Image: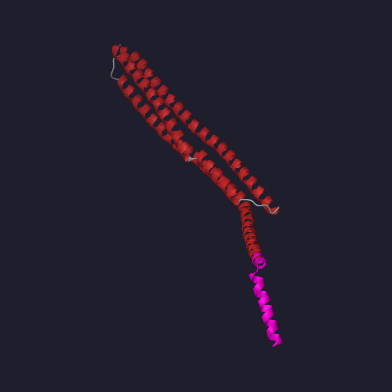
């Protein structure tokens, strides 16, 4: 009987304690502390993951930048080599054609010399000299214009290479600065935002892609090609006039 009464008293005391305001406050504070610890654990876990990610970014970053830079260098060298090879073939074809034309004209003059009066021989030689002088002048002028055009493209590619190297160096430095800053925060258990590192990586990468876009090169080449073609057109117009004047002078003799 006494034991039963004792249990009833203890149970009543516990029941009253949990219903009391102080007990309610204690329970609330207890729950609050649990939530804080859970939140702290989540934050700590996220920070740990971020620190692991920044370490991986740091490990892979330099090799990726170097690999990308090497690829760009190889691509630039290949493009320059391909252009020079194409121009060499073009020159070979043009020179061969010029020799064929020269030989054909010489044969015509040789045949003409046999069919004109002797007193016209000197006039024919003067006419022949004018024709070949005009041809040589045209060929030389066109070759100079082509060399100017090609030189501009090679210079552009060279400047592009320098610009590319500068862009990659800036990209590497800016990102590495952010990585070092983030790693230091990890070491000192300070909060940091890995999104800032990823953001600057995207921003720097977008900047490089914009500055080194292939469209800029194509636009430059197209502009220079039009300039070259206009100069060649003027040279040919001058040549046609000189040939016409030479023919007229010969006929009037």
Q: Nearer the viewer, residue 121 or 147?
A: 147
Q: Main secondary structure of the magenta part?
A: helix
User: Which percent across, then down, holds residue 91?
Assistant: 44, 33
Task: State yes or no: residue 23 in magenta.
Answer: yes
Residue drawn at (68%, 75%) of the image: 13
Give the answer, above or below, for where 29 lies relative to 153.
Answer: below
* Residue 2 seen in the current view: yes
Give the answer, above or below, for where 147 lies relative to 168.
Answer: above
Residue drawn at (51%, 34%) of the image: 156
Q: Quadrant of the C terminus?
A: top left
Q: Nearer the viewer, residue 104 or 167?
A: 167
Give the answer, above or below, for where 61 lies relative to 164.
Answer: below
Q: Quadrant of the N terminus?
A: bottom right
User: Which percent across, then down, holds residue 40?
Assistant: 65, 59
User: Which percent across, then down, holds residue 175?
Assistant: 61, 46
User: Image quarter for residue 204?
Assistant: top right
User: Which percent across, then down, holds residue 207?
Assistant: 53, 41
User: Image quarter for residue 103?
Assistant: top left
User: Image quarter for residue 111?
Assistant: top left
Q: Nearer the viewer, residue 118 or 238?
A: 238
Residue drawn at (38%, 23%) of the image: 234
Give the magenta range: 1-26
Q: Nearer the viewer, residue 117 or 38?
A: 38
Task: State yes or no: residue 102 in magenta.
Answer: no
């Amino acid at each position: 009987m006494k034991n039963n009464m004792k249990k009833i008293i203890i149970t009543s005391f516990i029941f009253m304690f949990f219903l009391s305001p102080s007990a309610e406050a204690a329970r609330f504070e207890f729950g609050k502390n649990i939530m804080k610890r859970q939140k702290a654990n989540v934050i700590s876990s996220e920070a740990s993951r971020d620190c692991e990610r920044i370490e991986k970014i740091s490990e892979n970053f330099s090799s990726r930048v170097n690999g990308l830079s090497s690829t760009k260098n190889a691509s630039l060298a290949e493009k320059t080599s391909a252009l020079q090879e194409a121009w060499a073939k073009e020159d070979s074809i043009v020179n061969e054609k010029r020799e064929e034309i020269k030989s054909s004209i010489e044969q015509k003059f040789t045949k003409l010399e046999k069919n004109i009066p002797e007193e016209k021989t000197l006039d024919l030689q003067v006419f022949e000299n004018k024709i070949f002088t005009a041809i040589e002048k045209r060929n030389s002028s066109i070759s100079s214009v082509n060399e100017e055009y090609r030189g501009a493209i090679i210079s552009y590619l060279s400047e592009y290479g320098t610009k590319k190297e500068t862009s990659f160096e800036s990209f590497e430095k800016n990102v590495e600065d952010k990585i070092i800053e983030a790693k230091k925060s990890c070491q000192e258990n300070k909060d940091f935002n890995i999104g800032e590192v990823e953001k600057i990586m995207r921003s720097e990468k977008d900047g490089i892609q914009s500055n080194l876009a292939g469209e800029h090169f194509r636009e430059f080449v197209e502009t220079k090609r039009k300039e070259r073609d206009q100069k060649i057109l003027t040279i040919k117009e001058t040549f046609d006039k000189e040939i016409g004047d030479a023919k007229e002078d010969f006929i009037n003799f």
